[in-house]
Amino acid sequence: MAGRAGSGAGMIEGAPWRKWVFFYVPLTFFVVGTLFPFYWMLVTAFRPDGELYRPWRAVNNTPFWTTQPTVEHVLYLFKQTMFATWLWNTMFIALVSTVISLFCGLLAGYSLARLRFPLAGGLGTGIFVTYLVPPTLLFIPLADIIRDFRLGDTPWSLILTYPTFLIPFCTWLMMGYFKTIPKELEECARIDGASRVRAMVQIIFPIATPGILSAGIFAFTLSWNEFIYALVFLSSPQQKTVPVGVVSELIRGDVFFWGPLMAGALLGSVPVALIYSFFVEHYVAGLTGAVKG
Amino acid sequence: MAQVMMKDLNKKYDEVHAVKDVNLHIRDKEFVVLVGPSGCGKSTTLRMVAGLEEITAGEITIGDRVVNDLPPKDRDIAMVFQNYALYPHMTVYDNMAFGLKMRKFPKPEIAKRVGEAAEILGIQELLKRKPRQLSGGQRQRVAVGRAIVRHPQVFLFDEPLSNLDAKLRVQMRVELKRLHDRLETTAIYVTHDQVEAMTLGDRVVVMKDGWIQQVGEPLELYGKPSNRFVAGFIGSPSMNFVEITVADANGALWADTPGLRVKVPPAIAGRLGAYKGQRVTLGIRPEDLRIAAGSDSADYSFDTVIEVVEPLGSEILLDLKAGPNVIVARVEPTVRAKLHDKMRLTLHQERVHFFDNKTELAI
C-alpha cells in the first residue's frame, strides 16, 4: 500500500510545481476535509462547557483547540446516561447479527459461486435485489412482523432484522471472492480424499480468510452504525444502541448537549476504528481479491 | 494398479454434447494420452474418470469396480492439474501429506511416503516452503509428488506441462516418462500437444468434437492415420493435403491436378480403383518428400518453385508451389535452396495417403 500511495506523485510528469498543483494540494484538501469533522468531534468532546457556549467573537476564544481539556463529558456520559449499557447492547447486537449473516453469507456465496443448480443465476440476482430495497421502506412491514412476534424493544428485534441487509451483502462479497479461487484447488482436495464440505472448510475457507474478514468487518460496521431500525424497534432507554441512545437522550427538545454528544460519538466510533486498523491489510486484499497458487 | 474401461461414455451439457460414445479400454500399467484440439472432449472425459463431472450416459470401470456413482475420493485416483492446484496456505510437506491425512494414515507412514516421493522428485529441500515461494517447475514437481505419495490405482494428468516454458516442458516430459517406468501405474494423460502425446503415450487417443478419431500406438497413428483429421493433427509440420482427380491412363491410375501428376502406387491402386474419375485428397508428409535425383522414377516426381525457405538448423523447411498447390517439404540442412528457384521433388511412394473427400476416411 505504501509503495502504491507513494507512486501517486511519481506518476505526474513534468516540472515540480505540477506535482504540487495536481497532487499534494488536492490531496491536502481532501485529507483535511475528511478528517476535520473527526477533529472537531475530538475537540468538542474534551472542551469544557464554559468554552463550548462562549460567543464566537469573545475574547480569548479558541474555536480550533482547547486550553482546558476536561473529561467531564465522558464522566457525564457514564454517570448520567446509560451509555455503558448502550455500548454493550450495540456490541452484542452487532456481533450476533454479524455471525449469523457471515455464516449464511458464506454458505450462500459458496453455493452460488460453485454449485450448478437450476435457477442459480436468478437466485443470485434475487438476493442482490433484496439488498437494494431501502431500509426506510422496509422498516414499515418489518415493524409489523416484529410486533407480531412480540420482539419489540428486545435486542432480537435488531439481531433478526439486520441480516435482511447483511446477508445479501455478505453473500455477494463472498461469492465474488470464491470465484477468484481456482476451482481446481477444491477438486484436488476432493480427489485427495475430502468430501465437498470438508474441502470447503479445510481448503477454501482458509484461503478465503481475507474475504471473510472484510465481509465480517463491513457487516459489523453496518450493524454498529445502523440507525433507523434501532430507532423504530427499540423504545426503552436500557435497550438502546449507541447511535440511537446518544441522539435520543442527549438532544432534549431543541437543546443539544454538545459535549456529551460528541464524547458519545467519539467513544462509539473507537471500536470500529480499532477493528479497521487491526485488519486493514486483510480487508484490502479481501476487496481486491487476490489468490495466487 | 488397475485397468480403466469406458463404455459408451457420453457427456451432455445443456446444449453441448461434449463427449460422444467413447469406448476405451486402458490396460493395467498403460500410459494412455488423450489428445485433440481444445473443445474436443478430452478433458471432460478425464474429469468423468476423476468423478468431477457427472456421467450423462455410459459406464466407467476402474479395476473391477463401476465408479459411476462413486465420489472422487473413493475412486483411488490421483490427479495433476494444469495450474498445479497446490493449496497456497499449506507448506509443500502438508500439500503432499494432505491426501494421506484425509485417509488417516499414521504419522510415521506419512513422513516416510512424503520423504520417498520428495527424493524421487528431488524436492527434499523445498518441503518447508509455501507454494508461492516456488518456481513453476518446482510447483509442478510438488503437484506430481502429491499424486504419487498415495500410490493410487490410476494417475490422471490434465495438461500438466502447459504452464511451463518450452525448455522445462521437455525436461519434465522426460521425467514423467521415467517416473511412469519406475512406478508402473496406469496413467491417463490429456494434452493438446501432439509431440507430448507421441513421446509419452504407450497408446494415443485422438479426439475431435467429442468423438474418438483413432486409438493406437504413436507410430501407428503417424504411419496409418485412419482419417484426414488424424493425419493432419499428428506430425509437425503437418501433412500436405492436395485435392486431386483419380485418372486412368496407360493401364495405371494417376493422381492428377494442375501442376501435379503422379502415379498412384500399386499398393493403393486396388483400393483407389473405385474412385476412378472422382476427386479425392492426396496426403504426403513433408519428410516423405525429397529432392529428385536422376535415378528417381519420373512417375513419382513433380516440379515446384520455392516460395519460402525456413532453415531450422537441423533441417530446412521449404514452402513450395506445384501449380496452385502449396506444399511443405523437409530437406537436409545442406541443401542450397534459394527463393524462386525451381526444384523437382519425388515422393516416397509407400507413404502416400489418400482420403475420401466426403467421409474424410483413409482409403
Image (cartoon, coloured by chain):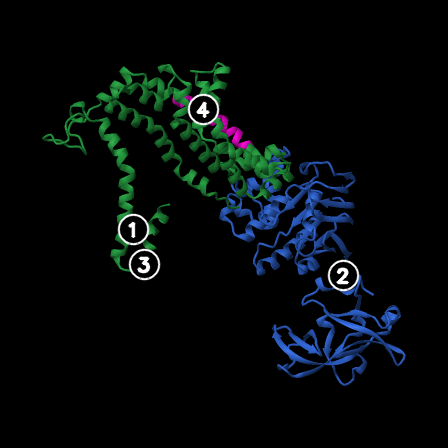
Chain colours: A green, B blue
A259 or A214, which lies in front? A259
| Of marks 2 and 3, the one in the foreground | 3
Q: Main secondary structure of the magenta part?
A: helix
Q: Quarter of the image holding residue A30?
A: top left
Q: Is residue B62 above or below residue A217?
A: below
| Of marks 4 and 1, the one in the foreground | 4
Amino acid carrying label 1: it is Phe
| Of marks 4 and 2, the one in the foreground | 4
Given the image, what chain letter belongs to the residue carrying mark 2? B
Q: Secondary structure at mark 2?
A: helix
Q: Which residue is label 2 attached to?
A: B221
| Of marks 1 and 2, the one in the foreground | 1
Gap between marks 4 and 2 measured at Cα: 72 Å
Q: Is residue B87 magenta?
A: no
Do marks 4 and 1 both belong to one polypeptide chain? yes
Q: Which residue is label 4 attached to?
A: A139
- Give the x, y percent position of residue A172: 51, 36
| Disc 1 and disc 2 in contact, CB within 8 angstroms | no
The magenta region covers A90-107
- Give the x, y percent position of residue B55: 73, 41
Do marks 1 and 2 both belong to one polypeptide chain? no
Quarter of the image where the N terminus of chain B is located? top right
Amino acid carrying label 4: it is Phe
**Residue depicted at 72% across the width and 64% down the height:** B232
Give the residue furthest to the bottom: B294
